[in-house]
Amino acid sequence: MSVIEVRGVDRSFVVRRRSGRLRRASTTVHAVRDLSFSVEAGEMVGYIGPNGAGKSTTIKMLTGILVPSAGSLRVAGYTPYAERAALAQRIGVVFGQRTTLWWDLPLRDSYDLLRRIYRIPADRYRENLDTFTDLLGLGPLLDTPVRQLSLGQRMRGDIAAALLHDPDVVYLDEPTIGLDVVSKSNLRDFLRETNRERGVTVLLTTHDLVDIERLCSRVMVIDAGRLVFDGSLEGLHGLGEARRTLVVDLVEPARRSTYPTRRRCGSTGRDSGWPSLPRPAPRRWSPPSLPPTRSPTSPSWSPTSRT
Amino acid sequence: MRSTVSLWFAVAHRSFRRYSTYRAATFAGIFTNSVFGLIISFTYIAVWKQNPTAGGYDVADAVTYAWLGQAMIMTVAVWSGGATDDLAARIKTGDVAIDLYRPVSLLGWYLASDLGRAGYHLLTRGLAPMIFGALVFDLHYPANALVWAQFAVSVVLAVTVSFGVRMLVSASAFWLLDDTGVKHLAAVFAMFFSGLAVPLVLFPGWTSDVAQALPWAAYLQVPADIWLGKHQGLDALAAVGFQVLWTVVLLLTCHLVLARANRKVVVHGG
């Protein structure tokens, strides 16, 4: 059974900006267009794409804090925006750039508040807290106020917080952002373990492809609000030509047959961290296509408009 | 239901503890309140020397009022501050999204949190300057246990009314993105109409009646008059009823405004 069902979802925002002294022009920005996918129970899916592609918008719709402009969503059998409170019991969210913990309180107090918010049975709470304290090494941190935790410590605290109420689905929005290599690796081990042991469905947003490589069997790529790829990581690597040009300057001239210059070499794209998508032709650098002259209505930083 | 109440208590308790971690700020605040209490007391003594029955107070009433005012500033959070400021900050940073997806009421959460804060401020910034004032001046005290009880209820209601007003100010950040301007404006109104600057009973003629009907009267004038025994019997009940009325009106308004804000964020995007 699919835990997450997204069918033809659109989300647009109206952005108003000044277009004159008093006039304001409204433009509609499509954050997500015609998005469809489904995630099965127990899957661990990577959700990647450049900044502004619509990842966070998707996650916000899946948690119910944004209503889609069109299309339908189901998470764990609920329509997120209509049944937000009921859904909240079944999902956990980690925002890498925000914390769900209480800044001035010791970690333990945050967890106790969460126990009450989610009405976690006392024995289940103790069991989960013990497990996570153990696996994430939170023991010495439990009595430290969150504001005194380092980023890596806080992130571990946040991940435990998201899992305390045994959610079916966890959204991880850039959970490894800003973490060092060792912390990232430990966090990944924990996530893999949790996914396997508890069968939690995980939707992982990240800019670090290594996260995806280590954790997810399936990747979805979103670009400009559209899903452009949904499949295995190998498939994604195979998709792009992922070629790069290697120019070699030799100290001494060599025989052409031994060192062919300007030959295009195939690459797996693996080492680049980000596979390049198919390109029509080898790219030559050309200046960005800016209009040659600025119109008088251009922003006020342009000296010509200050009249 | 019981678990919800226990959650609110837990929130209030944590909020109390949170404020109690900043001890230096508490001592500095108590010192400031005490100094201002002295200044205002001497000013009132001078005023009541000229007019010994101004506003129906005698000079001891007036000096008591001055110290009650100092005690209530932080407890009621007359100008601003408290849990509602946290909300405004969270709206600005977008952290409010986290509050929204939790299966608890935003209003209940912040009210519990603010009551916890008020409890801490009452025991420190309220009690300490009051004791200092009592040592320096001859003050009036509630006549009997009933008046003490009425005063206690009145203080809690003063906090809820002030919370309602501050919550509306903070919620304006959902539309304005920054509530600083509204907050300053609200602080001026609160300062003037709570009776903190000048007791409302001193306002001339009908302006006094108008001021005493506004929600800010519930901050200081009403609890002070109960303490001083100006409201007796049914009159005391009416005074508390006035606070209850404003609490209900303001919390309902908050509820509607937050529902709209929620709709705005959820439907239109934040």
Image: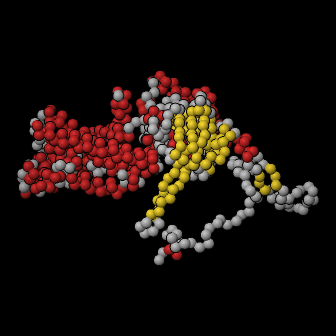
> Which residue occupies 70% across, 65% down?
A286
* Residue positioned most to the bottom: A307
In this orientation, which residue lies closer to the viewer: A158 or A104?
A158
Pick whichever, A271 or A58, lies toward us. A58
**Image position of B80 with respect to B156: above or below:** below
Q: Nearer the viewer, residue B12 or A290?
A: A290
Give the quarter of the image for residue A285.
bottom right
In the displayed structure, would residue A287 be above or below residue A83? below
User: Residue at 29% of width from left, 42% of height from top?
Assistant: B252
Q: Quadrant of residue A197?
A: top right
Q: Position of residue A43 (x, y in %)?
A: 62, 33
Q: In x, y percent, where is residue B155?
A: 23, 40
Q: Residue at x 47, y 60 (%)?
A: A26
Residue at 22% from the left image edge and 48% from the top image edge:
B215
**Relative to A290, does residue B205 appear above or below in the rendering?**
above
| Residue that lies at the very extreme toward the top in this rendered image | A123
Q: Is residue B23 visible?
A: no
Indicate the quadrant containing the N terminus of chain A: top left, top right, bottom left or bottom right.
top right
* Residue A253 visible (yes or no): yes
- Left or right, B83 with respect to A32, comes to left
What percent of the width, then of the height, locates residue A100?
48, 40
